[in-house]
């Protein structure tokens, strides 16, 4: 029962409207002091503005693509010949190497450490809450890593970054430090889905025919490091297109190679055209139709995370 008397209630409840507070993750982002690119389209991952981020010890930025309330991304830049801080966290992160070559040391407490070597085009994911550290082997040029992650969901669930970055629980049902963990060949699970923990070069990954998505279309779906975040890699031939399709929020489309454009629209709304080339990233809005067209001189290939 309320203790407020009727004459003490607002005369017009409709005049006092509820204002939804910002999602916890976005408030935490602003406290980090690095650029936040709020957009659905980033022309070049290599040219996005970055600034020092104390948490990782990197030059970095956030990229908030359309509907980033579940899945977000950030870019880490490692100076020539240097390394970032060792870190661990409760959100999953898929690491795509935009530029450079180096290695990452991954350690599950209580088990031997593993080293994953990477180059431009590599894709891997440190198992959740493992301790890891990125190293740039190139003495002359910085390396750039794109990390697509579910931090928006995890942080907004717990409302405390101290827990997300400092909890010590060992998820050894996912990973026990197996020496061959990042060397195992892909395990085909059916329906174009493979389980794999490391891909050295996405441009050379074998794909499966999927004609129902367009003539010459090829795709493979990926399960990385026992994550709940999934990914897939698709390609389509010169002068062809992917059939229009739509899905939920959070898809980060990263163009590996090729040149062309995509059309995006919701029912009853005009179409929006996005030009892309190698290094472009964009996200179709939640449940919006989108269709990709290859106008270049080579097959176009892209990973989509998740």
Image (cartoon, rainbow, N blue to C red):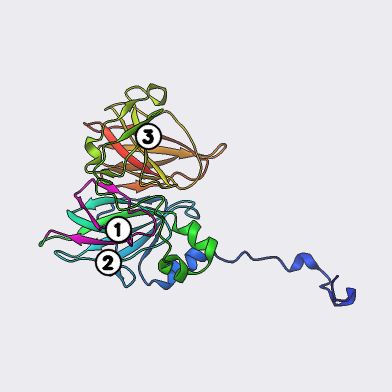
Residue 10: horizontal and vertical position, in percent? Answer: 81, 73
Q: Is residue 18 above or below residue 121?
A: below
Q: Is residue 131 magenta?
A: yes
Q: Residues within 10 Å of mark 1 (few under 14, many from 20)?
A: few
Q: Nearer the viewer, mark 2 or mark 1?
A: 1
Q: Tell me where the magenta segment starts and ends, as one range.
A: 109-138
Q: Earlier in the sequence, mark 2 or mark 1?
A: 2
Does the magenta portion include 73? Answer: no
Q: Residue at x 28, y 32 (%)?
A: 295
Q: Nearer the viewer, mark 1 or mark 3?
A: 1
Residue under label 3 = 292
Spatial CA distance of label 2 from label 1 is 30 Å
Q: Residue at x 27, y 45 (%)?
A: 198
Label 1 secondary element: loop
**Residue at label 1?**
111
- Tell me the tag on residue 59: 2
């Amino acid at each position: 029962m309320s203790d407020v008397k009727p004459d003490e209630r607002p005369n017009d409840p409709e005049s006092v409207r509820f204002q939804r507070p910002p999602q916890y993750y976005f408030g935490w982002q602003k406290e980090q002091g690095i650029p936040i690119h709020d957009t659905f389209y980033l022309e070049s991952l290599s040219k996005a503005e970055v600034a020092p981020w104390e948490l990782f010890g990197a030059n970095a930025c956030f990229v908030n693509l359309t509907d980033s309330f579940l899945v977000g991304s950030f870019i880490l830049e490692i100076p020539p010949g240097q390394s970032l801080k060792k870190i661990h966290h409760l959100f999953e992160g898929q690491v795509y190497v935009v530029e450079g070559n180096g290695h990452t040391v991954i350690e599950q407490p209580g088990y031997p450490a593993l080293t994953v070597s990477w180059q431009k085009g590599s894709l891997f994911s440190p198992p959740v809450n493992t301790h890891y550290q990125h190293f740039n082997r190139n003495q002359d040029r910085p390396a750039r890593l794109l990390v697509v992650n579910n931090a928006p969901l995890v942080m907004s669930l717990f409302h405390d970054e101290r827990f997300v970055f400092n909890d010590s629980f060992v998820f050894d049902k996912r990973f026990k430090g197996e020496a061959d963990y990042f060397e195992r060949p892909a395990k085909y699970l059916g329906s174009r889905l493979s389980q794999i923990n490391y891909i050295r070069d996405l441009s050379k990954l074998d794909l499966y025919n999927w004609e129902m998505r367009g003539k010459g279309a090829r795709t493979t779906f990926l399960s990385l490091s026992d994550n709940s975040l999934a990914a897939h890699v698709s390609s389509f031939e010169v002068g062809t297109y992917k059939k229009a399709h739509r899905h939920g929020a959070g898809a980060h489309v990263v163009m590996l190679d090729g040149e062309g454009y995509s059309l995006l629209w919701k029912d009853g709304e005009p179409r929006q055209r996005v030009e892309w080339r190698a290094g472009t990233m964009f996200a179709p809005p939640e449940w919006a139709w989108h269709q990709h067209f290859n106008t270049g001189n080579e097959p176009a290939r892209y990973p989509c995370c998740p």
